[in-house]
Amino acid sequence: MNRRESISYLKEQITNHLPGQEAHLRMLPYIRELIPLGKHIQPKESAVLIVIWYDQTFKTCVIKRTAKMRNHAGQFALPGGKFDIAEDQNLMDTAIRETFEEVGLEIDKQDVIGPLSRIYIPVSTFYITPFVAFINDKPQFHINPDEVEAIDELIIEELFISKGNMEVDVKGRTLSVPSYNCNNTKIWGATAMILSEMEIIWNRLIEKAQNQIHIEQS
């Protein structure tokens, strides 16, 4: 499959065949359950962006949040943030705007393939909608030092075979949680749960490509 066919297949899968909760549960930290949104809770709508590009192979990126951030300080995450009613018409606008504000990357709406499954985070009462975008050129990042300490570029196939566990400190307790551990980049919690859905979709793409090669060689 060429790049155009790959992105077209990803779009079809994202539009019609999201694994949703099945994917989220695979990377759910043992410290909590997949809690549904209660009627009494008014969640804060937010959005993040999985940016994909091709540079000899398919790549994506995560950011390391600064230690002074209010939520998830020092953790690896996807660029994104809270919906701003004054600036955003919808959550895709949020993902695009926040990505520009955090890493200086301008994403055109036409580059957005579509949304993944929403996920509710009870600790922060955020309802996160992830979006996936594919850009044709290698990104030129410009970090906002108030929010981002570093950007890690990751080869997608290496990321998705790097699953394991890591130890985290939660209120003075050291706990082992499922994570992606790629090139010393350790991703857990909500970000890992979001990437888990992308992993399932990506593996479908790899399987389809391999089947196509097999047919062509037969």
Image (cartoon, grey):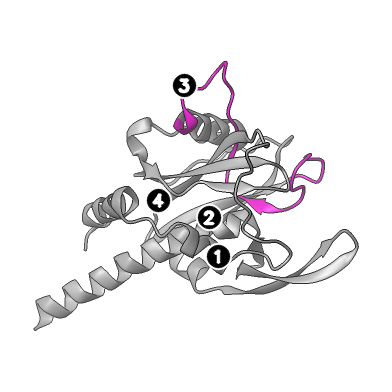
- Which quadrant of the figure has residue 112? top left
Q: Which residue is labeled 2 in the image?
A: 194
Tell me the mark number nearer the camera, choosing from 2 and 1: 1
Query: Does the magenta portion include 91?
Result: yes
Q: Is residue 155 left or right of residue 81?
A: left
The x, y position of residue 63, in whole percent, is 63, 49
Q: Are marks 2 and 3 in contact (CB under 8 Å)?
A: no
Q: Is residue 36 left or right of residue 137?
A: right
Q: Residues within 10 Å of mark 2 (few under 14, many from 20)?
A: many
The x, y position of residue 179, in whole percent, is 63, 68
| Label 1 – label 4 distance at C-alpha | 27 Å
The foreground one among 93 and 156 is 93
Residue drawn at x 50%, y 46% as measured from the top left: 118
Amino acid found under the numbered disc labelled 4: Trp
Amino acid found under the numbered disc labelled 3: Gln
Q: Which residue is labeled 1 in the image?
A: 25
The x, y position of residue 54, in whole percent, is 37, 54
**Of marks 1 and 3, which one's residue comes earlier in the chain?**
1
Asked if 186 appears above or below 11 in the picture, the reply is below
Magenta residues span: 66-92
The x, y position of residue 95, in whole percent, is 51, 35
